Amino acid sequence: QSCRKAGAAWRQLIGRRQASLEAARPRVVAMYERIEAGSLAGGDKEGALLAQTCAAFFLLLEGRDAHPLAHATAYLPAACPLGGGGGGEAGGEGGVAALEPALPSLEPSLLRDARLPYLSLYKSKAALWGGYLLAQWGVARALSLDETATMAQEAANLRDAHAWSIPTSAALAAMCRHSPLVELAAGNGLWAKALLERGADVLAFDTEAWQLSFAAGGGAAGGGEGTAAGEGAPFTEGEALMGAREACVEHGGPEAAAAHPDRALVLMWPDYGGRGSYGLACLRAYRGDRLLLVGEWRGATFGRRSESGESFSAEFQREVEAGFVREELHRLPTWPGSLDHVAVWRRRRA
């Protein structure tokens, strides 16, 4: 509020305090050690508080603290200082309609499952970052812009190395109920392997290298968002994707969707940055009745790159909404700036 009264961005005011923060470094470290000692023996709530503290500081730095969905990052809403009504009660920016059914609340219990290494890694990183940023703010009323940039880059690197969304036991159980499954754009197979370990019947496919034909404006699927083929593409033609894969991931693209209409189709972040036509190609090839979509959606995103989110293109979302009915929503923990969930869709029948 003080930033708005001063007519300055919060990030600008924080930037002016970098020298005083550096001078207070020893006290910041001591404060962090006290925070860490207090949380080590804690349970779900302590970890959830630090995770939502981390998310809150990043939203403040991005100027999204008053976003209608800022409160949706909270595991414990009573301890969240941000605006918004929580859940899916308000839509994104630009007049985008709210998600229906409403985005469920985050629960501290989502962070509990030692059998999911990626979830445990997220929990430890979010606690480390949240605790350290809280120490900086508590001592110097400032945040290190260099260190928050490093945290954001590390989060991006972890997503590239593991998966774009973080699995939970609840989400995996919900997906298992719709087995058999066929997953396209399966990445390194982290989710597919976790589903198999829980008894699901899963076929997972992906291509080893980036195909420029599926970039924004690419013509392979007849999609595109009005840009030239390859413009703004996150990779170059033939560039390797996602590193080493699990043995359960086979080579295959959208054509695999056509070959398995008897299975529910799983898609997770198929369109980088919310642009491209890979997801649309999979959707148009699929003749089955059930979609399991993992990532962001319009009405449930902070709109950092687009009001449709960063997981599925706008055209893909329009075609899904026209041809399917959303029946289930399951929240996921997310790296700062995202609002991931698992949505289950059923095809409309005449």
Image (spheres, rainbow, N blue to C red):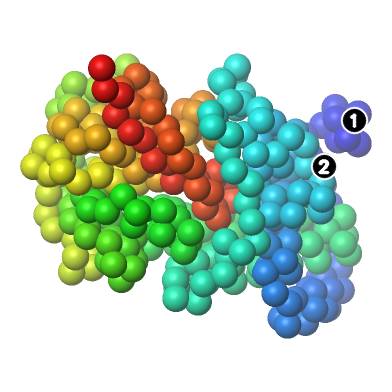
The residue that mark 2 highlights is 13
Judge by depth and name the residue closer to the eye, 21 or 338.
338
Report the side of 330 relative to 289 (left or right): right
Q: Which part of the image, by quadrant, shows the C terminus?
A: top left
Identify the element where label 2 is drawn: helix
Report the side of 312 relative to 210 (left or right): right
What percent of the width, then of the height, locates residue 241? 25, 54
Judge by depth and name the residue closer to the eye, 6 or 195.
195
Query: Where on the picture, by quarter, is residue 276?
Result: top left
Residue at 66 percent across and 28 percent down: it is: 90
Q: Amino acid type of disc 1? A: Ala
What crowding class fits label 2: few (fewer than 14 Cα within 10 Å), some (14-19), or many (20 or more)? few
Identify the element where label 1 is drawn: helix
Q: Which part of the image, by quadrant, shows the N terminus?
A: top right
Q: Amino acid type of disc 2? A: Leu
What percent of the width, then of the height, locates residue 321? 38, 23
What crowding class fits label 1: few (fewer than 14 Cα within 10 Å), some (14-19), or many (20 or more)? few
- Residue 6, which numbered label? 1
